[in-house]
Image (cartoon, rainbow, N blue to C red):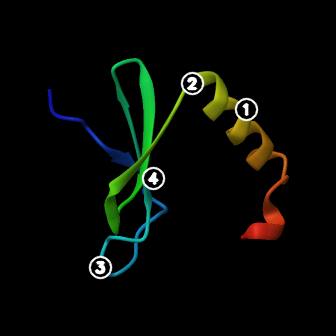
Amino acid sequence: MEIQWRKSSKSSNAEGNACLELAEHGGEILMRESDNPDVIIRTTRVKLRAFLGGAKEGEFDDLA
């Protein structure tokens, strides 16, 4: 089964490769950078939800 990668419409540049891509596969959430697609981070929905909640609350603003 081919993995269907998704990316935000807000994350691209002229080359279209400045983004993070997410996919669901085998019960896991997968994440990769479009310019380095061979490196894949695997996580769960619960962990991703916790991370996104922290990001929405500004916990990582100092890194951006």
For label 4, the crowd category at 10 Å Cα-Cα, with few meaning under 14, some 14 to 19 and many 20 or more, is few
- The amino acid marked with disc number 1 is Ala
Q: Position of residue 36 (x, y in %)?
A: 35, 65
Q: Which residue is mark 2?
A: 45
| In the rendered image, the vertical position of residue 5 relative to residue 11, given as above or below | above
The first of marks 3 and 4 along the sequence is 4
Could you tell me how many numbered marks the image carries? 4
Give the number of the disc on residue 50: 1
Give SS at disc 4: loop
Q: Position of residue 46 (x, y in %)?
A: 64, 22
Q: Which residue is mark 3?
A: 15
Give SS at disc 1: helix
Q: Which residue is mark 4?
A: 8
Give the number of the disc on residue 38: none
The first of marks 1 and 4 along the sequence is 4
Give SS at disc 2: helix
The first of marks 2 and 1 along the sequence is 2
- The amino acid marked with disc number 4 is Ser
For marks 4 and 2, give the one nearer the viewer: 2
Labelled pair 3, 1 in contact (Cβ < 8 Å): no
Q: Is residue 34 left or right of residue 1?
A: right
Residue at image position (84%, 46%) is 57
The first of marks 4 and 2 along the sequence is 4
Look at the image and tell me in which quarter the N terminus lies: top left
Q: CA distance from mark 4 to mark 2?
A: 18 Å
| In the rendered image, the vertical position of residue 57 relative to residue 47, given as above or below | below
Q: CA distance from mark 2 to mark 3?
A: 30 Å
Q: Is residue 36 left or right of residue 46?
A: left
Q: Quadrant of residue 25?
A: top left
